[in-house]
Image: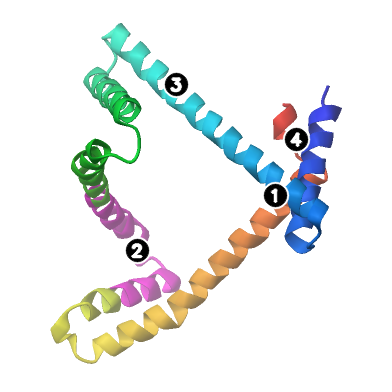
Amino acid sequence: MRLIPTALAITVGLFTLLDFFFDHPLLNNVGATFREWAIILTAFALLLGLGNLLFVHFLRVTRRNEPGTGYSAIVLVVTLGVFAVGLWYTLPSSEMAWLFNHVYLPLQGAFFALTAFFLATAAYRALRARNLETTLMVIAAVIVLIGQIPLAGMLADAREWILRVPSEAGLRGIMLGVALGTLATALRLIIGMDRPYSE
């Protein structure tokens, strides 16, 4: 039974890869069809995830003795309310825009504000000067932070150099690592070494 999903995954992966590198009418049509199927599968996966979210929080609300029951009730009410408004008024509509501007955007701002505190505590734990490397990172972080002040003077130039040279080099290294890791994972899926779809 594992042979059929593996063969399908290899075939779809090869056709998509060939369509990316070669311009041929057959490859273009097959690649476009596979991409449309991927969009449809993503939509069903989103609905499945929404159903799982509602089921988990519904169970937590019905048990009543678990911590966070109130938050689960809020999640259920807001999710069902947004879903009902979306079905009734469809997209795009002024009602959905109101929900986006007055519910989603304030929540996003609150999460970003909490992320700032989390990053500050994580930076405090990570940047304790225990060796030469962390000491250099602390010095660079202090220069960048002080360089944000308009009256910092020549530290502003040092901040620009740190952000433009070492930080940019580290970012490029991370992006290269991510690209190579993605490529290796895709190749392992295409040649059938990894088979998450059949397990």
Q: Reading the chain from its start, which is encountered first: label 3 or label 4?
A: 3
| Amino acid type, residue under disc 1 in the picture | Thr
User: Where residue 35 sits in the image (x, y, percent)?
Assistant: 65, 45
Q: Which residue is mark 4?
A: 195
The quarter of the displayed image where residue 66 is located? top left
Which residues are drawn in magenta? 113-141
Q: Reading the chain from its start, which is encountered first: label 2 or label 4?
A: 2
User: Where residue 79 sits in the image (x, y, percent)?
Assistant: 31, 26
The reply to whether the C-beta atoms of the residues labelled 3 and 2 are less than 8 Å apart is no
Q: Residue at x 28, y 28 (%)?
A: 85
Residue 185: mark in rendering: 1
Q: Split into 4 quadrants, where in the image is the N terminus?
A: top right
| Amino acid type, residue under disc 2 in the picture | Leu
Q: Residue at x 83, y 45 (%)?
A: 191
Q: Which residue is mark 3?
A: 51
Residue 171: mark in rendering: none
Q: Residue at x 26, y 17 (%)?
A: 69
